[in-house]
Amino acid sequence: MSLVTVATFLGILAILAILGDALLVLSRAARELIRPNALGLAAVVAATATAGSLYFSEVARLEPCALCWYQRIAMYPLVILLGLAAFRGERLVRPYVLALAGIGAAISAYHIAVQRLPGLPSGSCSLTVPCSAIQVEVLGVITIPVLALIAFLSIIVLMAVAGGTDAQEHTP
């Protein structure tokens, strides 16, 4: 598959994720319907984001910048945490998932700002792979950090839908 095809597919998934997140935030019925599968869906989001990032770097040969690496550091463990939690039906990972997803979302938001406002200091970014470079853009707005931000926010929404920890639910 070509870079344009994969980027467009991921862009469409991101738009669907935004619509799904909005539905979950606005509709109690949607939250109740999704709640039993929220951990599994969050694992799918994390796995898709991870696969997308690996495609961009390993197949399309786009070298990730420093901020992209930090976002990966926050996303990759979520695949394992959420996958195991979904398999075992445990929500005890919720605080850890929220911490990683929150940190990843903050880095993604900053990365978007660096891309759109190139004068913004980008810290550890290199001259060979500047964080302000836009390597992929779908619909004129969806870049790789936008994809990451949407994934992190979707995971946060799904964790909110999943509800409290198992220990809290068994408390009288």
Image: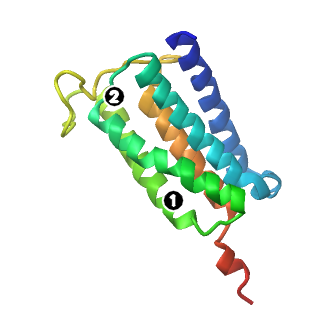
Farthest-out residue, bottom = 172
Q: Is residue 62 depicted above or below 39 in this figure?
A: above
Residue at the image position 63 percent from the left and 24 percent from the top: 12
* SS for callout 2: loop
Q: Which residue matches tag 2?
A: 64
Instruction: Return the residue nearer the eye: 105 or 83.
Output: 83
Dot 1: few (<14), some (14–19), or many (≥20) neighbours within 10 Å?
some
CA gap between label 1 and label 2 equals 24 Å
The image quadrant of residue 19 is: top right
Asked whether 26 or 164 is in front, the reply is 164
Residue 76 position in % (x across, y down): 47, 45
Q: Which amino acid does label 1 sit on?
A: Leu
One can see residue 104 in this view: yes
Determine whether 81 is above or below 68 in the image.
Answer: below
What is the x, y in percent for residue 151? Answer: 54, 40
Give coordinates of residue 97: x percent, y percent: 52, 58
In the picture, which quadrant includes the N terminus? top right
Left or right, residue 39 beside residue 102? right
In this rendering, the answer to whether 45 lies above or below 136 is below
The circle drawn on residue 68 is none
Q: Is 67 left, or right, of 17 in this rendering?
A: left
Amino acid type at image mark 2: Pro
Q: Residue at x 59, y 35 (%)?
A: 48
Answer above or below: position of 42 versus 124: below
The residue that label 1 is drawn on is 98
